[in-house]
Amino acid sequence: MKQTDIYSIFVTCPKGLHYVLERELESLGAAIIKATPAGVDVEADKISLYRILLWSRVSNRVIIQLTKGKVSSAEDVYDIAASVDWQSHFSEEKTFSVDFIGTNEVINNSIFGALKVKDAIVDQFRENTGVRPSVSKTEPDMRVSARLQKGRLSIGLDLSGESLHKRGYRTATGRAPLKENLAAGLLALAGWPDQYAEDAGFIDPMCGSGTLLIEAAMFACNKAPGLDRQVWGFDAWCHHDLETWLTIKDAAAEAFSSGKLSFRGRIIGFDQDSSVVSRAWDNIKQAGFDDLIHVEKRELSELTLFDKIQPGLLLSNPPYGERLGEVKELESLYALFGQQFENHLIGWRAGIFTGNVDLGRKVAWRSYKQYKLYNGAIDSQLLLFQLNQENRFKEAWQAPSQKIHDPGYWKVTNSERAEMFKNRLAKNLRTVGKWAKKQQISCYRLYDADMPEFAIAVDVYLDDSMEKWLHVQEYAAPKSIDEMTSMERLREALAVLPESLSVPPENIVLKRRAIQKGVAQYEKNDSLGSYLKIQENEVRLLVNLTDYLDTGLFLDHRAIRRWVGENLKGKRFLNLFCYTATVTANAAMGGATESLSLDMSRTYLNWAKDNFSANGLDLSKHKLSQQDCVEWLAKSPVDKLYDVIFLDPPSFSNSKRMEGVLDIQRDHASLIDGAMKHLEEDGQLIFSNNLRKFKIDEAELSGRYAIENISAKTIDKDFERNQKIHQCWLIKHK
């Protein structure tokens, strides 16, 4: 094949960096055909192809396109792959693998698609040579790439081998490291290539394993990212031109030598973790920059500039937190970035790459550019700042979701709509409120999204001094309601509540369930430690309105607690997934002779202990134990039977403390079977859960047990509008 042959090539990159890649590929001699979020289609001769492989800083893979075709059946995949003359690209002595991406109505599994391509290749080799090449999933000599998109299959050869982000210098990483090509893309977007030529300085004050530092040095010293790689995907390619490749690689080595000598800037990194700094040093040495990059243990609060460092770029990827408590703790960290910008870096340029743009705004500087990118699958943004005093804000920007907790932000926008909400609250006070007072119920739900315009739940809590508190939870708005409209209505509802319910604004606590994801609903929200003492069914309990999404007391289980308190005298009680053990406290105060309460959370068990202490309960008779209830039910010996068991598992759990994943719809039968082994012959199991679409497997369970749906009996007047707040069954041995 001649050197002037032109190849159709698809170059992939991290999502969001395709425009950076497009400019890079043009500079390397490729002709741009089309840029997409997944990568860039180009045409290039062999010299440009080798330059792309060696010099591209942001690409993942370089794939030569061999054939394309429409896929209407599984056999079409085989036929398209069989149309390629595979012997002209690699020999039967070489191992290969197939990477298949995409599905459609006939190829609904990428493994199946890969299998069809593999079969076509080995069948062709066997037919032509009598020998079939071996497949290697770990270290193949040749990678075949197949991509199915919009019913069309593209098949090519991945000449990269391992992904090009693996430069070979990273021997160790810190927590959540940036991939090297993403780091290079951030540097390109932040303007570092325009600065290092002027001997500008570079700082990463939270450098982790040093990826941004090393990639900045590679830019500044003109080091090709692939210069240190020893193994390539094209090594087994029949059209590989070793002489041309070595010439290009030698030129790159010379460029690095001269580039390193000419750079006079300083590249500095800090991190507060000495073990992470040690790993960064190892990576820096491996990359050949130990005489150029300096790293040391230093906290962000200790940031200083070294002598002779010229104004340049600060770029960092600080933590952004996935849990509520973490995010709140990080607000001060981002604010400290902004303060250090002002203290030390006026005249510099700065960039913050974060998966939480609201945290990014806490730096309180005007961002002149924002790039939406992805760190793996995480939506992220690169915020760029020009550090001149006029771009400094007097105070940090706050999102409406943060300001909503300040009563000064509450406002009535539509007086007619607000009046309707007031009237509904007044009506509910005359019905539910009057009922609760008559029943001597101090904590109850007053309003539960009665009006679609105000999708909130309002719970009333009277503490032991009879001071009133409101716990307000916002439900997720329908997709048809935009965020600003939803926020306007929430502000309006909060503005109405104090006067309508005679509650001071500071006694109203808002929880925004709409913004919680995954395990966040079970995580700590704040650290105020604001516990209220309340009384229910002659039982004293502690609730916390501020620190967690839930308060420690599930109001919808009030009737269950009442029944337990009235029916456990002289009996033994087992509480599984006990949470703060409020049901157990009712059992004990109702005369239960002994109890065992199990939960996986030490926080909740400590809370349960406080509930027991508030009622003077004997912990030698009423025991608390930190257990994975799923594992306990499966493995615990049946050495004691209980008269009443309460089983109230979460709908789903993948806690790190668990051996597996709990899915209540899938696993409820085995949980019930496990619990029934610990139940006396004439005992009662109360099984409850709050999964709205849950259906108990009566076909399987009714053959072994007597099952009665008692949901209606366990829902008090304040939850009548929401009959699906939970489901509950009474289960007995037959």
Image (cartoon, grey):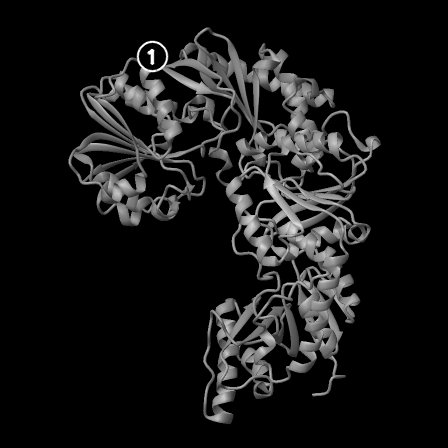
Q: Residues within 10 Å of mark 1 (few under 14, many from 20)?
A: some
Q: Position of residue 22 (x, y in %)?
A: 76, 63
Q: Nearer the viewer, residue 34 or 496?
A: 34
200 sits left or right of 483 in the view: right
Is residue 3 shown above or below 228? below
Residue 201 visible? The answer is yes
Is residue 405 shown above or below 134? above
Q: Position of residue 645 (x, y in %)?
A: 26, 32
Q: Nearer the viewer, residue 165 or 125?
A: 165
Q: Residue at x 56, y 75 (%)?
A: 144
561 sits left or right of 308 in the view: left
Residue 174 visible? The answer is no
Q: Residue at x 82, y 34 (%)?
A: 388
184 sits left or right of 118 in the view: right
Quarter of the N terminus within the rendering? bottom right
Q: Which residue is mark 1?
A: 538
Q: Position of residue 347 (x, y in %)?
A: 81, 37
